Image (cartoon, grey):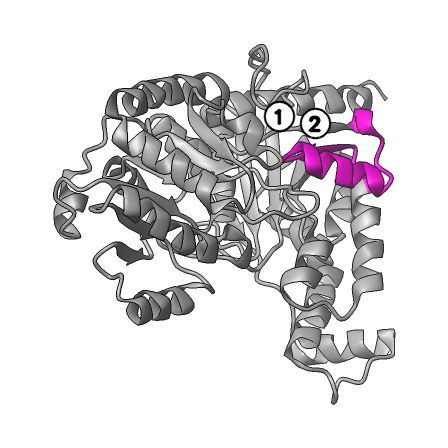
Amino acid sequence: MLGDGQSGRSASFPRTSPMNIAYLCADRGIPVLGDKGASVHVREFVTALAGQGHEVTLLCATRGEGNACPPVRIIELPSDESPEAVAHEATRLGVSITEAGGQLRRELGKLAGDRTLAARVVGALDRAGVRPDVLYERYALFHRAGRAVATALHIPLVLEVNAPLVVEQERFRQLHLKALADAVETEVMCHADRLVAVSDAMRDYAVSRGVPADRIAVLPNGVDTARFNPEADGQPVRERYGLGGRPVIGFVGSLKPWHGLEFLVDAMALVRARCPDVVLLVVGTGPGLSELQARVAREGIAGHVVLAGRVAHNDVPAHLAAMDLTVAPYVAQDGFYFSPLKVVESLAAGRPVVAPRLGQLTSLIHEGVTGLLYSPGDQESFADCVSGLLLDRPRRLAMGLQAVAAARTNFGWDRIARHVAALVADVRLPRAVQ
């Protein structure tokens, strides 16, 4: 990763000459001003690019709300998914629109929206007087318009892939048009001039799709170390939730099926046996919230589990400051591809992280130095790690200091943006010579 195969641990990259960068995020499920991890990723990455003097135009399907706008030009291009357009896609694919359920209609809508997206992007850039040097696209399921935009503007395309979206959609939701989704995914990955993968597992996945390994750069998620730092004051958050001086374990996330909330609540019983006053502070909302609320009520553990719900991203540093350590209890799965924002944000805040020994987590967390790793699914090992840190304050604080240093050295968005800018400058050079 970052040039030497190690997650964030490599030489720094020089600043490049200012460029005009068009960033395309066609996924309607990513409101760029929202609190989702993907939203934060988009917003902070373009902010870092702008901070280095690049002119960035962010073209998105959903602007959203809830956080301040990044210092870039934002052009919202709502998807063209009219009933007529969806019906046309159904006819083209030989699918009965009268029998189509909600998920199939959504898939047809993505295809319909993509069919006009390239023209809408080119038109929007022209009206804004923007002449980009490169198109940087965040890969979205069923979308192939980025290639058409880059071809029309005679600029290179750099594609960022954060997840195997076909696999993810089929495994955790539904996917009716799988063969078509597979074909589009392979096409867009193989036709990009360069590909940025968020983890080693994603690089391997792209290679399995036919992308040459030397065309792929691996970059983890980053963190704004100016906002996420150990100087944040967590006392108001402790007072808000009545935490007092009790030991607090923190979880920050969107409560998705793969986040391991069931495992976490199970393992907390073992932790409580060793640290009777411990509290689990869960920050975030998502599909697992209602079940988590029901379980807390059913098992009578409300005194040990605080569900904060949705918290604006700007308020997350204060919540981290109220925690003694954080956990990322992912469940084991083949090809673990995540590069969790919550891990690097916790490190930057000076909070050691306890996580399973999976995928890129083993690179983000320096075991025994910035956090502890346990065998996936092993509740006893998890409880040993967590309770050991809670009961050993000097060790926990020392790990926190090391975590801050590691985050500032390896995971700052500014550093990641410099690497991407260097990659973009490199891929532009052959085009400029032609």
Q: Disc 2 vs disc 1: which is toward the camera? A: 2
Which image quadrant for residue 226?
top left
Side of 112 relative to 350 (left or right): right
Rendered-image quadrant of the C terminus: top right
Instruction: Say if the magenta span includes residue 199.
Output: yes
Residue 19: x %, y % from top left: 60, 25
Q: Nearer the viewer, residue 201 or 389?
A: 389
Disc 2 element? strand
Q: Let me know if residue 24 appears in the view.
A: yes
What is the span of residues highlighted in magenta in the rendered image? 190-215
**Which amino acid lies under the numbered mark 1 shown in the image of this protein?**
Val
- At x 29% / y 49%, what residue is drawn? 281
Q: Nearer the viewer, residue 130 or 293?
A: 293
Taking 15 as reference, is 131 above or below it? below
Mark 2: give few (<14), some (14-19) or many (20+) Cα within 10 Å: many
- Disc 2 designates what residue? 217
Rendered-image quadrant of the N terminus: top right
- At x 52% / y 44%, what residue is drawn? 378
- Disc 1 designates what residue? 420
Disc 1 element? helix
Residue 101: x %, y % from top left: 68, 82
